[in-house]
Amino acid sequence: MVRIINTLDTPQEVDRESAVPVNKAENRSLYASREAIHPKEAHGFYRRLKWTLLIVLLGIYYVAPWLRWTRPGDAPDQAILIDMANRRFYFFFIEIWPQEFYYIAGLLIMAGVGLFLVTSLFGRAWCGYACPQTVWTDLYIWVESKIEGDRNARIKLDAAPWSVSKLSKRALKMFVWLLIAIATGGFWVFYFADAPSLFHDLVTGQAPSVAYFTIAVLTATTFTFAGFMREQVCTYMCPWPRIQGAMLDEESLIVTYNAWRGEPRHAGRKKAEAQGLKAGDCVDCNACVAVCPMGIDIRDGNQLECINCALCIDACDAVMDKTGKPRGLINYTTSDLYAANVAGKNEHWSWRHLIRPRTIIYFTAWAGVGLAMLFTLVHRTQLDVNVVPDRNPLYVTLSDGAIRNGYTVKILNKRQEPRTFRLSVDGLPGATMEMVGDTGAKGTSFEIPVDPDKLKAVKIYVSTDDPAIITKERSNFEFKVEELYRKDGAAPESKTYDALFHGPNGKE
Amino acid sequence: MATNIEKDDVSGTATTGHTWDGIKELNTPLPKWWLYTFYACVIWAIGYTILYPAWPLPGGASRGVLGWTSRGQLEQQMAAAAASQKETVDKIAAMSLPDILKDPKLLAYAQAGGSAAFKVNCVQCHGAGAAGGKGYPNLNDDDWLWGGTPEAIYVTLQHGIRYSDDPNTRDSQMPSFGIDGILTPEQIDQVANYVMTLSGETADAGKADAGKQIFAENCAACHGEDGKGNREFGAPNLSDKLWLYGGGIDNVKAQIHKPSMGVMPAWTKRLDDAAIKELAIYVHSLGGGEAPVTQ
């Protein structure tokens, strides 16, 4: 990280915060009630970064379901839609059928490996910046500070007896929180149905009860998690901090108090220096503790509770500016660099630390899954065929001695237009087909119309009296599905499906 | 009870006053959230036992003021299901079988409904895959004793086969040529050899020649001159490759000596007309169905 040297000649006075890190390991008792944390608002680069991310992420969440995307035919015109009733997932130009669920699995694998990658590079960046718990808690604390004031005012209000003023402030805060919570749950359901019409139904009370139920559950969890439980969710409920041990290494970026520079700390550094004592850069002002939303003291070292939100960096940098010392007493650094500096070497972080075997492997795995998915997505056909053979009975002997097998052939037309396919059997000598529900005519191929964006299942009986086939227990052949023509002039699609033909094999 | 409450020095928590071997028990209160949840559950439980059947009493549990029963709920659900299907079922009951076959929606419904009814009523003899077994016809093939049109299957289902409780049942009787002494064992051997030749199987040519005359005199009345059977009497086709009681000359001889004849119950009194129609359509669609008579 870049160190900015403050050019102020006369260091200013630093106010000392009376903040206590209530979640510090020594201060915490498992038998005691939780002590409320009132984080002071930080100002600086990381706070601005967090506000920006908060606006971007919440913006995506609230805006995404309202984006429209015109699709042909009867397909919904919502850009992002998880259509449970019709079992389709729409994402702009991509439409995914349940048969293609491996794309979702691939996305989840990418999300998992991506989390490993980001963690090994930047530590708990997810926790500090992007986790919904962090984002919504930040938003709730912002509302709290706008209504009740910053840290000290809130502590005072907490301790004050109930009055009209306190009651009205609390009521207003809860009301705004509740509105945010309802909006959180309310917008979640828009991903699962046509947003404008669902909004209308929700307001007029005509929406399905599952929508109201989902909103109620998410409203309750948002309200409690972001309003009251806050850091307890991260410390006690979330498994992610526990996985950190495996994900972080000596070269991951971690928010670190550089004790080699800060210690020994003195509240009155000048006085201490005048007394001939050795003094570090830390003036023990507790600014880092006051801004911490987790209620810990970063100077105790890397801790499970720390979500790496970097607000203590902002707080400390402001103090360093005042005291005329270089910024970065608390900064993003790695365990290796920290150890090197403790050992007296003056080493700095550079982007080269990002490239190491571990991150290369993670990145390769992450990019590999992504590219494989992209490749299959681009090359996927809009015709799919599945064949389910009858299992009971495996075969039927007909009166003329021929053998018949039954199959359910499923043709998936993934285009938004009606298409006609020719179904035939290939590689089975003497085979004739019969389609149930049709005219009952036998033939060697059938033309099957399939509606736009639909699956059509047809029951097909395949018979043969070829002596070579009917004496065998199993014969391989294939079903062939060919598109007759394409309106847009593109090459017609075709698919084959390997199937088995069962015979009596001399048994009766 | 201890009147003055002692506090533990280390934790500052009140003790219960109980001491065992010098160890005192702390009176740690239950967490508030737990206690309130517990009280809420108690209130819920009281309301629940009033509204729903709960208290065991002589002669059965208390009824509950809502009058709810699991049987009643099932009845409601069954009625709701029946009501939702009523329109389709009424259509099936009113329409002729060929018309149902022409309507893809009704056909799909009838096949599904027939499949469900088949699994309850028919699998005991005909098997889950309707493949039958020795003495129980395979309904998947194209060999029909009493006819394979939807109408013929429908009649068979309605009235059964050799079912004494139904006056309109399909009935026929094959004489026991052996045990009743109509044919001598030698004649049975000869006619059996002739029957084997009808379906192109190997047989003793001399015996078969002699058997031809015996067949014409004793068997052709029902099975036909050429042995192709007669569906009026449910007489099997002897010239095809399928044998209900097993192929091979020994099985044929046994059948002539003392024939086995299947019985099937009539379903008119057990199932409603729509269900029988659905079953007929399901069986017809198993692969061997013949074209309807009235197109």
Image: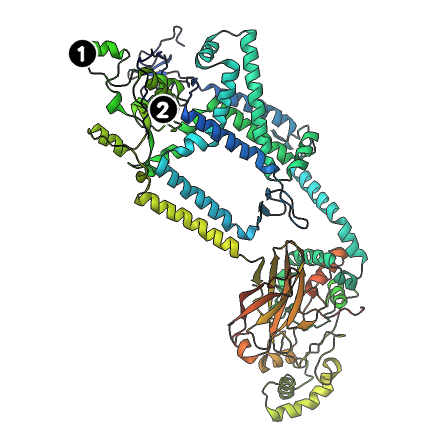
Q: Nearer the viewer, residue B211 or A191?
A: A191
Taking the view exactly as shown, the residue that stands out farthest to the left is A276
> Residue B240, percent across and down?
65, 79
Give the image quarter of residue A11.
top left
Up-down relation of residue A304 to residue A437 (above or below): above
The chain holding disc 2 is A
> Residue B191, percent across and down?
65, 86
Q: Is residue A424 visible?
A: yes
Label 1 is placed on what type of residue? Gly
At horizontal 19% and vertical 13% (from top left) the residue drawn is A277
At horizontal 55% and vertical 65% (from top left) the residue drawn is A496
As measured in the structure, the alpha-carbon distance from the residue carrying label 2 to the one carrying label 1 is: 29 Å
Q: Residues within 10 Å of mark 2 (few under 14, many from 20)?
A: many
Query: Residues at marks 2 and 1, common chain?
Result: yes
Q: Quadrant of the N terminus of chain A?
A: top left
Q: Is residue B42 visible?
A: no
The chain holding disc 1 is A
Element type at mark 2? helix
Give the image quarter of residue B138.
bottom right
Counting residues from the start of the chain, the first of labels 2 and 1 encountered is 1
On the image, numbered disc 1 is attached to which residue? A276
Taking the view exactly as shown, the residue that stands out farthest to the bottom is B206
Q: Residues within 10 Å of mark 1 (few under 14, many from 20)?
A: few
On the image, numbered disc 2 is attached to which residue? A313
Give the image quarter of residue B149.
bottom right
> Residue A27, percent across and down?
33, 18
